[in-house]
């Protein structure tokens, strides 16, 4: 019965491959295919699929070592070439001066924008936006758009006046390349093991600012970062207005996300773990740029630090993050959202200042094995 089930899954994936291959020739696609193939009992073909993912640039060994289906390969002779291929890809991404900033998907979006209300809009965007798009966009199509162009286009239509108003600003992201190169070079100084996967700016549906998911690089929804004085916000809900940012905030926001790409922590499980993980990204971003990622949250945190820490430490060993992370302003308390980022920042800052070897402190901050020990070693809690 199990063999029949596995074979059925395999046949389904094969049919899906024929339908979607043209737009999804990405590491994410071939990793998914390898998992399905191996589950169906064909390990040799699965290894071939993984080699294709590596050929397309797979740079993170966690794609294999953290997979329940694939991790056994990392311990076998036949997986040696796979891990070596990933290492070679990482080596190719080690030079910050060669960081790729891809903005062509924004141009393709606007080239097809006038077809938004055409009866065949889905097929037009599939052919001219997705299939002609970058590896980053094709990955985003799978991991964030869920291959659902109908839903994507409905969402863009509902926000059409906003999109029209940000069009000139979305065409400016290419001009930020020198800023990103300088930031990458500074990150390399702080953390010599850093790698620099591509940054893809694309046009999403106001549903995701940025993600490294999919193993292609950093995927950025430019529509979240294009606000300026000419932006028409009439079609945006109160929530949507809180998840768009001024164009001038692009570099610190993306550098923060890029630091996340470097992290090799033990998996986070508590509020404390997550706050330190986010705070590390904010603190290292500050060392790189000399400015907080979110000045408003930082300034509020400094002004109310004692009170915030007293509240935070009563919750920090639980799993509920609602009051501290990934939240918005609280009108009842007057607190801005994401104050857990500030607490984590201060813990990391204290850890850094306590350390004699600053470069080692950065490495330890990005490779935390025990968050409780990290807090203790920071001496932050003893200062408040």
Image: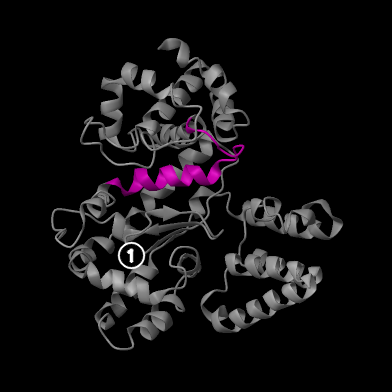
Residue 67 appears at what percent x and percent y? 68, 54
- Secondary element under disc 1, as helix, strand or loop, is loop
**Which residue is the extreme one toward the front?**
1
Residue 248 appears at what percent x and percent y? 26, 47
* Magenta-drawn segment: 249-271
The crowd level at tag 1 (other Cα within 10 Å; few <14, some 14-19, many 20+) is many
Quadrant of the image for the N terminus?
A: bottom right
Quadrant of the image for the C terminus?
A: top left
Pick the front one: 350 or 193: 350
> Residue drawn at (41%, 54%), measured in percent from left and top?
210
Q: Quadrant of residue 57?
A: bottom right
Residue picked out by circle 1: 205
Q: Quadrant of residue 263?
A: top right
Q: Is residue 111 left or right of residue 73?
A: left
- Based on the picture, tell me whether residue 255 belongs to the magenta stretch: yes
Q: Is residue 218 left or right of residue 12?
A: left
293 versus 95 height, above or below: above
> Residue drawn at (56%, 43%), measured in percent from left and top?
194
Q: Is residue 157 left or right of residue 381?
A: left
Pick the front one: 143 or 348: 143
**Which residue is the extreme one toward the right?**
77
Residue 284 appears at what percent x and percent y? 45, 34
Residue 312 appears at what percent x and percent y? 40, 24
- Based on the picture, tell me whether residue 201 belongs to the magenta stretch: no
> Residue drawn at (47%, 79%), measured in percent from left and top?
131
101 versus 104 height, above or below: above
Helix, strand or loop for the magenta stretch, by majority: helix
Q: Could one spot residue 151 in this view of the protein? A: yes
């Amino acid at each position: 019965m199990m063999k029949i089930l596995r074979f059925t899954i395999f046949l389904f994936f094969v049919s899906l491959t024929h339908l979607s291959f043209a737009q999804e020739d990405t590491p994410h696609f071939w990793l998914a295919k390898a998992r399905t193939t191996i589950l169906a009992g064909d390990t040799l073909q699965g290894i071939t699929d993984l080699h294709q993912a590596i050929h397309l640039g797979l740079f993170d060994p966690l794609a294999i070592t953290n997979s329940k289906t694939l991790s056994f390969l990392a311990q076998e002779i036949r997986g040696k070439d796979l891990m070596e291929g990933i290492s070679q890809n990482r080596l190719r991404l080690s030079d910050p001066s060669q960081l790729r900033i891809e903005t062509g998907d924004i141009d393709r979006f606007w080239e097809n924008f006038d077809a938004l209300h055409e009866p065949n809009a889905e097929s037009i965007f599939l052919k001219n936006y997705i299939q002609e798009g970058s590896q980053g966009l094709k990955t985003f199509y799978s991991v964030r758009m869920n291959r659902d162009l109908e839903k994507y286009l409905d969402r863009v239509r509902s926000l059409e006046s906003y999109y029209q108003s940000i069009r000139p600003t979305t065409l400016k992201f290419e001009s930020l390349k020198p800023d990103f190169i300088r930031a990458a070079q500074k990150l390399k100084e702080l953390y010599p093991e850093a790698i620099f996967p591509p940054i893809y700016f694309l046009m999403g549906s106001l549903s995701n600012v940025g993600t490294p998911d999919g193993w292609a690089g950093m995927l950025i929804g430019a529509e979240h970062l294009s606000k300026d004085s000419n932006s028409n916000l009439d079609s945006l809900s109160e929530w949507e207005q809180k998840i768009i940012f001024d164009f001038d905030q692009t570099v610190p926001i993306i550098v923060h996300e890029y630091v996340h790409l470097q992290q090799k922590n033990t998996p986070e499980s508590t509020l404390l773990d997550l706050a330190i993980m986010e705070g590390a990204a904010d603190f290292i971003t500050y060392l790189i740029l000399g400015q907080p990622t979110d000045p408003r949250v930082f300034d509020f945190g400094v002004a109310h630090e004692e009170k915030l820490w007293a509240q935070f430490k009563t919750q920090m060993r639980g799993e509920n993050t609602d009051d501290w992370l990934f939240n918005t302003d609280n009108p009842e308390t007057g607190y801005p959202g994401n104050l857990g980022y500030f607490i984590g920042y201060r813990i990391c800052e204290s850890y850094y200042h306590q350390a004699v070897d600053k470069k080692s402190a950065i490495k330890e901050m990005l490779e935390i094995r025990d968050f409780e020990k990290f807090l203790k070693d920071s001496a932050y809690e003893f200062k408040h």
